[in-house]
Structures are given as structure tokens and as C-alpha cells.
Image: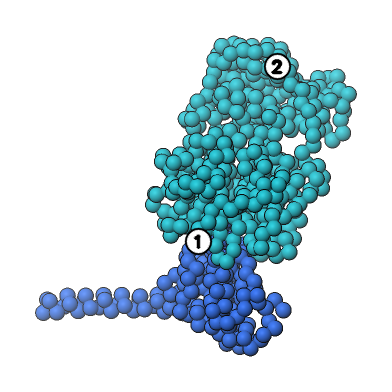
Amino acid sequence: MKKIFTAFLFNIFVISPSFALIEIDITRGNLDPLPIAISPLHVDVKSENYDGIKIKDLGNEISKIIEDNFRATGLFNPLKKEAFVQKPDIAHLKPRFEDWRLIKAQALVTGKLLIKESKLKVEFRLWDLAAAKEMTALAFTTTPSNWRRVAHIISDKIYERLTGEEGYFDTRIIYVAESGPKNQRIKKLAIMDQDGANTKYLTLGNELVLTPRFNPTNQMVTYMSYFRNMPRVYLLDIETGTQEVVGNFPGMTFAPRFSPDGKKIVMSFAKDGNSDIYTMDLDSRVVERITDHSSIDTSPSFSPDGKFIAFNSDRSGLQQIYVMRSDGSGVKRITFGKGIYGTPVWSPRGDLIAFTKMRKGRFYIGVMRVDGTGERLLTENYYQEAPSWSPNGRVLVFYRETKAGSKGEGFSAKLWSIDITGYNERRLKTETDASDPSWSSLLSK
Amino acid sequence: MMFNKSLKNILLVIFATLILSACSTAKKSGNIDGDVYTGKETVKYLASGVPDRVFFATNKSSLTTASRATLRKQATFLRKNKNLNVTIEGHADERGTREYNLALGERRANAARDYLMTYGISGKRISVISYGKEKPVNPASTPLAWSQNRRSVTVKVN
């Protein structure tokens, strides 16, 4: 398999430190997005050609990616470039602040780039226009083919500087790409950048695959496959393409997830009509049974400190969410609202659990505190489920299906995202229909 | 007189309601009882008179009287065909979370397997597999389609 995570190093230099005057309160939602001007990066005339890259357009392309990232947050309002008043190179040296203020911009991003000796050098500056000050500035050197990632890393740095939160742009999403009629769906594992670029298919579609999830370093994926009609949990090394069955269970294993240290996989094993939760240590291969109950126990998700597991059980009759210590002790039901609950997923910050709720034929994605209090439903639809967190715990990605007609026509499955504020619901671009998304952690952390 | 007239009207309304509801049950009666599909539209046969599948209520894996009758026919058929092995495929409808549905399909397939075993069929002859909601027999998004999709299907493997 082709290497997807090409190893490379970024050299990052902080040019000058400074302090923030503009700030964005991201807990508030998108009520008043910050007007920001993202100038095209100036392309140095000394730049050399590099295979497959149109150097002349690169400055525009990078600023376009940053602009799209920022628009997608709902927190920023990137201004139209036609209104820009200064040339990129001059603005990058020292903007005429009053001119940029005139077009109502509050922040300005400028930059320049150079390809020389097969290296791409990019620097950018973020300016606070009201205070007429530089807020942050960074320079990168990397392989030119990494230019999209440079744009995402710049986006992350600006986002961090303006919101005080970690960014989530230099990330990928693994999901199940779907095609074909509804009753003969072809499903493949697919991976893409969070903005929908660089889609790669990791399986051919010969067998049904479901529920892929990244490990903490994003090199491994655990998922379920019906290879040889034996539904089992698998482990895939994205770099080498090596796949293996996880454990030697005499029946179906499913609903896998990594522990936060990446050393274990937690999953369900079904036997004689009863599904319980197990872990397997990836080094020692030791299997541990975590739940032992005659009900269905599934959809396990570790807390980020590894001490607890949230899971789905119908031991009370219908699906509800429970939390237990990671050794299986201290099981406690946390959902008592009207309706039934599934797919608990612990936030990377540890403070919230995202879930799917079903009530009166409608499906909701919501969040609650880890003791089940403070339930907030973020979005309602005909069918949607399986939330996955952005690495900063601010955005959820999930999938949504539409109602089908009598022959299955009109059916679609798409990825959507929504802020945990309940604002900024948007569809993610995918080449095909898509389901079961899992968001990576930051790639360059 | 007045009283009679209004009584007549009421009776008429009741009569009309009865006809209407008769129509709607007639439309459904051959198909869904409570929440469980009872029709034959999707059913195949292991042999003449031996249906291959049984249907379940939403979120349930208990066998109805009709399901038990079907499974007894399957058991009789399997006793007569001693060299035949089967796989029971368990399925769920699309109105539930994927992972829970995988478990539910497994539970349904095992409910059918257990029943066959109580009628003397060796567990070694019966394997189970759950497809959750992944293989609907009817792709429509209607209560009828969902009831047809909540099923366990006995499939010959040799």
C-alpha cells in the first residue's frame, strides 16, 4: 500500500512573540463571526519549479485553504479578496492598518513563500488591525508536496492565537465510503484530510467494512470487517497496509476503539446471543472480559485518562448509556431522559460524552456531562448517529442518512459536522456517500 | 324523532369508521401484526412448505407463535436432511445505531438457533452470523419494509 502518512519534518521558527488584543469567545457559537482578511501569500520571484506544483498559483491556493478552514468554523468571516487594498508582499512587510480597517477587517493574515533547492519555505504573520500590531509570526520549511498541510498548520496556529484553543485543521477523517443501491451497498475504508482533500481508499470493497477508528498516533486503525464472511475486529497499519484480526474469538467481534494510550483495543464480542465488552492488549495479546451481563453491552469508549469506559447496554430493557471503571467495576447508568440512547463517545477534554438519541422516530446527536446531567441535543433529523470528536473537543462529525423511496431511491449517507454549541451544522465534502466517521488527532503535534 | 335522527347519524359515522378501519386493517392484516411482519412477500422456502425466515418486533428477539411454527417446520426439514448444515443470518431494521443492531441481529439469529436446538437439531449444524442493518431485504424507509428487515433467515450451506 502506498504510504499515506509520509514522514516529514517541519522546521518551525517563531519570528516574534506578542500579545493578543482581539479574542474570540468560541463558547458562544457563530453569532458574530470575526471579519478576517486573508491575503494571498506572496510568491518569491526566485522560486524554482517543482514537479506537479504550479508555483505561480501556490500563494493563492494556500490562502484559499486557510480561508475555507476559517469559514467552516463559523467563528470567522473571511472577507472577499477583491476588496483588498494592498499587494501581498507589501502588506506582509507592514500593512497599512487604516486601509484594512476601512474594509472592516479586524485581523489580517499575510505571508510569503519560496521554493528553492526542492524545499518549500513559507512564512506568515497575523496582524491585529485595531491595535496595529503583529500578533504572531511563523516560518516553515518542508517538502513542497506538503503544501496543503502547511496551509492547515498555519490555520491551526492562527486559530490557536485568536481563540486560545487548539486547532483541528491539520487532521484527517477516516470513514466508510459507500456506493451502490441501498440493499447492495459496497463499503470501503477511506481516509481524507478534514477539508475533504486527498481522499484515499484503503480497502477495495470486496467485503463489508464498518466503524473504523484511529489510534492516538493516527498510524493504526481498528475496524470491523466481514472478510471471508467472518465478522471480526481488525487492525490496519496505514503505513504498511498490514492487516490482522484482533484476538482469536470464536464469534463476532465488533464496535472496536483504542484505549487513550493506544495499547489496548476495547470491543464487543457476541456469543450465543449475548454481547459483552472485552479488551485486548496489543503487545501481550492478553484478552480481558470487562462486562459479564446477559444484556447487549456495546459501543465502548474510554475516558481520555483511561480510567473509565462509557458504553451502551440494554440491561434495563432498552438502549441506555452506562459508565464503569475500566476494569468493569462500578457500573452506573447515566441516561434517564425520555427516549433511548446509543454510541457514547468521551470528549478528548474529558468533560462531555457525545451520544445518539432516538425518540419518537427522530434521531438526535447530543452531548451531556459524564454523569449524565446537562443533556443538550444539538441536532435532530430523520436518521443520524455515531458522533466523533474533533481533537480539541469543539466539533462533532457524524453521519446522516435520508429516507428512501419504495425501491430504495433517494437514499444517501453523508458526513456532517456541528459545533458543540449547536451552531454551524455543515456537510463535509466526500467523493462518495459516507458513514462512520472518525476524526484523527492533530497530525503535527 | 330528533333523537332518532342524530342516533342514525352517529351510527352512520360509526359504520363509516368501521369500514375505514376495516380497510386499513385489511391492508395490513396480511402483513403486520402489532410490529411483526406476518406476510409472505419476501419469504423463500428451504423446501416446499418450509419458510426460510422468521420476523421480529422492534428491538426484540423473542419468537412469536407464528415464528415458532415456522422454526418447527425447519426442524422437521433438518431432521429429514441429516447431512444438511445451515447458517442463520440475523438482521435488524435501519432505525437503530449500527453497533447495537449488530448485537441485536446476533441475538435474533441465536433465538432461532436455540429453538431449532430444542427440537433436536445439533448446534454443530447451525452457525449464526449477524448482519445488523447492513443487508435490508426491502430498501424502502417504511414501517412495512422495516418489519420485513427485522428477520432471521435460515440458509443452507451445503
SS type, badge 1: loop
Q: Dot 1 falls on which chain?
A: A
Note whether residue B96 is visible: no
Q: Is residue A403 above or below residue A132?
A: below
SS type, badge 2: strand
> Foreground: A164 or A78?
A164
Scheme of image coloration:
by chain
Q: Which mark is on residue B65? A: none
Q: Is residue A185 above or below residue A266?
A: below
Colour blue maps to chain: B
Note whether residue A55 is visible: yes
Colour cyan maps to chain: A
Locate residue A140: give its quadrant. Answer: top right
Circle 2 packing at 10 Å, graded few (<14), some (14-19), many (20+), is few
Q: Residue at x 70, y 19 (%)?
A: A138
Q: Earlier in the sequence, mark 1 or mark 2?
A: 2
Q: Position of residue A431 (x, y in %)?
A: 69, 48
Q: Residue at x 47, y 71 (%)?
A: B62
Left/right of residue A112 with respect to residue B29 in the rendered view = right
Amino acid on which the number 2 mark rests in the picture: Val
Q: Which mark is on residue A294? A: 1
Q: Is residue A265 above or below residue A151?
A: below
